[in-house]
Amino acid sequence: MDKLYSRFCPAILLGLLFTGMQASAAEPVRLILDTDMGNDCDDALALAMIHALENRNEVHLLAVTITKDNRDAAPFVDLVNHFYGRPDVPIGVVHDGKTPKDAPMLKVPVERRDAHGNFVYPRRLHDGSQAPEAVELLTRILSQQPDGSVTIAQIGFSTNLARLVATPPGRLLAAQKVKALYLMAGNFQKSQPEYNVFTDAPAFHDLMKNWPTPIIFSGFEIGLVITYPMESIEKDFAWTTDHPVVEAYKVYVGKPEDHPNWDSTAVLEAIRPDRGYFDFSPAGNVELGEKDTTTFTPDANGKCRYLILKPGQVSRLRELIALLVSEPPQKAPLTAGSQRLAF
Ligand SMILES: [Ca+2]
């Protein structure tokens, strides 16, 4: 071994080792968000949290697909993505879907203009009809990903994902590409129907039957307790005068109060599955029960588990989610006043 080699080899090896460790530590979760944006402000809180975690390279938002069949849903998602400096996130919309009714939490920020007539929140999409169909987009995005690499968080109805796996090629694609599916759906404490399930119950039934990967549920009982604090809305956004998610929250909630935050819990666990935020049920199967309730049957070979609240974690999770949701974008927030986009 010559002297030069013996002197530098350990350093090079160490350097390579460290580079390898960094590469492995920095691999972000490849996430697809499927949302009924507009039916509750917690979808907007969850999207803001994803952007904060993407700032930290913990997640890469591959696409957002929407199950609320309303023309303002895609423009709202798009303007939030623009606000956070990620204008290129692909967005897909449901066709012939549920809850087409207009939603003020979407319409107010989508339509608001400044004194010069410019949109306060610039966006690429001005109507959902300008976006591709959701299953088409899911198929394209999944096909481009490495096998077993994608996490999906569904925080609305099962319409899009049930359609994806309704065909053998769709099931095969999901089985190949998706690591796990996180759902905000169901109620595992009480035998009561839950909104995301009963709004498209046939789709939920089909999803449970056909979805090929592990499924982790955040049930109604979780987000009911881990509320979003109104105090955060009032105090944590002093860095901006205009924020589309704060605006959506205020329009939706309508009064100064904490609001249940179901969707962020499923998304947080999807991105940080190893932080011990929750306990888990044993493995089992979830089915559509009577009157659109959800039934869980333990089965060692079952593909489903549901989150269980650790009482000692509630305040930690409320604070954590509020900190992430209120985190400023990495670049200056994109609003009409920032002059970064002329409209
Ligand atoms: Ca939702």
Image (spheres, grey):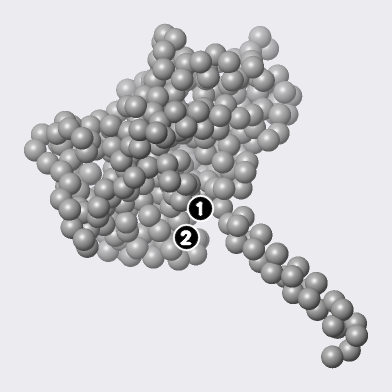
Cβ atoms at labels 1 and 2 below 8 Å apart:
yes
Measured in 3D between alpha carbons, the distance from the residue under mark 1 to the one under mark 2, in whole angstroms, is 7 Å
Nearer-the-camera pick, 106 or 29: 29
Residue 284 is left or right of residue 35, and the answer is: left
Residue at 51% across, 24% down: 245
Outermost residue to the right: 3
Task: Classify residue 21 by image quadrant.
Answer: bottom right
* Residue found 70% across the figure and 19% down from its top: 337
Give the image location of residue 74, x and y in percent: 46, 33
Q: Which residue is drawn at 30% across and 41% down?
A: 308
Q: Mark 2 points at which residue?
A: 149
Residue 127 visible in the picture? no
Q: Position of residue 272 (x, y in %)?
A: 48, 47
Residue 30's tag is: 1
Say left or right for 128 vs 19. Answer: left
Pick whichever, 44 or 24, lies toward us: 24
Sequence-earlier tag: 1 or 2:
1
Q: Is residue 164 above or below residue 118?
A: below
The image shows residue 335 at horizontal and vertical percentages of 65, 23
Q: What residue type is labelled 2?
A: Ser
**In the foreground, 40 or 335:** 40
Q: Nearer the viewer, residue 250 or 305?
A: 305
Where does the image place residue 1, in percent across and percent down from the top left? 84, 91
Q: What element carries label 1?
A: strand
